[in-house]
Amino acid sequence: MKNAAEYLGRIKALIVLNNQVLRWEVVREEQQGNIGLFRCRLRLLDGSLLEMFEYFHIEAEEVQVTKYSFHWYDADGTLRKRWDNAAHHPEISTFPHHVHVGADARVLPHEPISAEKVLASVAEELL
């Protein structure tokens, strides 16, 4: 990636090409040189909702995601998964990266994740 605009274009293309996405909207988008952020909502074919937030910068043409939160809800609003790197679970081995799973929001270790990986993971789970 050369800059934030190129990365945002790539994420939007992945959303448009994802056959599980019914409709989507950009809630917020900012880009300035190599720094950017986006927040968007995706309604998926099964009725579930995926809310995505990512703050990133480009360094040596590589995307570095510094802050993220991805929330995936069932059609009735029940949490399926929430991936984030908020520093509120220091007991987790992958701190600050973790995932909340299910309606009881069990907190489990998880490697750092990006919008691209979340889109692929959700699409795979829906197949």
Image (spheres, grey):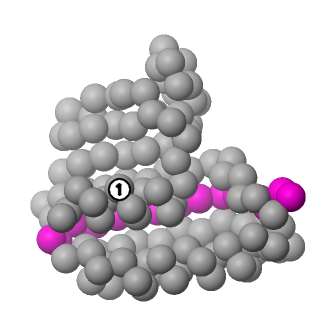
Query: Residue sitting at 81 percent across and 63 percent down?
Result: 61
User: Is residue 17 located in the magenta-colored stretch of the structure?
Assistant: no
In this rendering, the answer to whether 39 lies above or below 121 is: below
In this rendering, the answer to whether 87 lies above or below 17 is: above
Rendered-image quadrant of the N terminus:
bottom right
* Image coordinates for residue 43, horizontal then vertical, percent: 28, 75
Q: Is residue 41 left or right of residue 126?
A: right
Query: Residue sitting at 63 percent across and 48 percent down?
Result: 67
Q: Which residue is mark 1?
A: 121
User: Is residue 58 located in the magenta-colored stretch of the structure?
Assistant: yes
> Is residue 30 at all visible to an observer of this figure?
no
* Image coordinates for residue 83, horizontal then vertical, percent: 43, 44
Q: Which residues are magenta?
A: 46-60
Q: Is residue 86 left or right of residue 64?
A: left
Query: Residue sitting at 56 percent across and 51 percent down?
Result: 68
* Image coordinates for residue 93, horizontal then vertical, percent: 50, 18
* Image coordinates for residue 110, horizontal then vertical, percent: 45, 34
Element class at badge 1 = helix
Circle 1 Cα neighbour tier, 10 Å, few/some/many (<14 / 14–19 / ≥20): few
> Is residue 8 at all visible to an observer of this figure?
yes
The image quadrant that residue 16 belongs to is: bottom left
Q: Is residue 26 left or right of residue 18?
A: right
